[in-house]
Image (cartoon, rainbow, N blue to C red):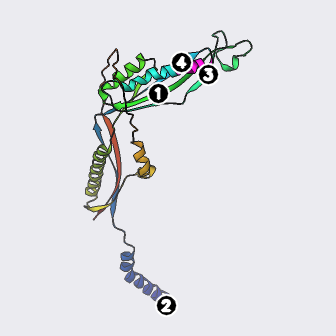
Amino acid sequence: MIQYRVAAIAAFALGASAPALAQEHSVQASITVIGRGHSETPPDRFTVSAEIEGRGASPVLALRALADAQSKVSDVAKLEGLDKVSFTTGSPALRPTFSPSCGGSGYDRDTDDCPIVGYVASMSMTLEASPIARAGDALSLASERGARNASVQAFTLADVSQQEILAQRAAFEDARRQAQALATASDQRIVRLVRLQDPSAEQYPPAELRAMHRVEEVVVTGARVRPTVSLDVAPPPVRTEARVLATFEIE
């Protein structure tokens, strides 16, 4: 009997304190979703890459031939109508060449029986410029001046800030639609936005983001040139994507 009364008193005490405990540890109901959005904009900048090569019977002759080839190919930066030009080269390389009768692998070659017959000096080049309409002509002129394996590598935007805003706005609207659908399905309503963040923001510090979009321009002087063969290009729009992590309070 005594045990029963003690248990009853304890139960009453717990029951009396339950609302206070619930109030102290109450957690506001919320919905967290990931919204996705994108924007599409015509590109205004292109990148052409190619390889430059020089051959000679000696390292000096091969390097001299490479320098001559570089001088000719660099004229692509003077292409008529180009704007915001950036012309860069990769690190040069020099390698020996052997007679075709020697083995195809370097391990199969014996320099006594398979002497060096020449040298090849090479480097890569990259041209970034505007407008898009000149991309085909830039590739044509680079090939005409002796570049090898020339190709238009990319079509981009010089400034993506406005496109990022549009994509983020679309991502937020997507998050709001998802949250509204979940709230309606659970007979709740959205009260307010509690938290909003970019899930990938921590991967790139602000300084690094700015560096990704910075372009070092080259001031081109001298007479403008034209390619013998003109090429037209029609690239697809640049797609800018965004994600947001949004938390909404519900009741």
Quadrant (top left, top right, bottom left, bottom right) of the C terminus: bottom left
**Left or right: residue 62 compared with residue 48:** right
Can you give x and y, in whole percent of width and height, for residue 85 in the image? Answer: 37, 32
Looking at the image, is 106 positioned above or below residue 165? above
Nearer to me, 25 or 45: 45
The answer to whether the residue labelled 2 contacts the one labelled 1, judged by CB atoms less than 8 Å apart, is no
Can you give x and y, in whole percent of width and height, for residue 156 in the image? Answer: 35, 35
Q: Which of labels 2 and 3 is toward the front?
A: 3
User: Which kind of residue does numbered mark 3 sit on?
Assistant: Arg
Question: According to the image, label 3 marks what residue?
Answer: 95
Local packing at callout 1 (Cα closer than 10 Å; few below 14, some 14-19, many 20+) is many
Q: Which residues are magenta?
A: 58-66
Local packing at callout 4 (Cα closer than 10 Å; few below 14, some 14-19, many 20+) is many
Query: Which of pointers 3 and 1 lies earlier in the amino acid sequence?
Result: 3
Question: According to the image, label 1 marks what residue?
Answer: 125
Q: Which of labels 3 and 4 is toward the front?
A: 4
Looking at the image, is 48 positioned above or below residue 112? below
Local packing at callout 2 (Cα closer than 10 Å; few below 14, some 14-19, many 20+) is few
Q: SS class of the residue under badge 3?
A: strand
**Which residue is drawn at the image coordinates 43% and 87% (left, top)?**
9
Question: According to the image, label 2 marks what residue?
Answer: 2
Chief secondary structure of the magenta portion: helix
Question: According to the image, label 4 marks what residue?
Answer: 65
Q: Quadrant of residue 37?
A: top left
Q: Which of labels 4 and 1 is toward the front?
A: 4
Q: SS class of the residue under badge 4?
A: helix
User: Which kind of residue does numbered mark 4 sit on?
Assistant: Ala
User: Which kind of residue does numbered mark 2 sit on?
Assistant: Ile
Nearer to me, 66 or 4: 66
Looking at the image, is 3 positioned above or below residue 77? below
Nearer to me, 104 or 84: 84
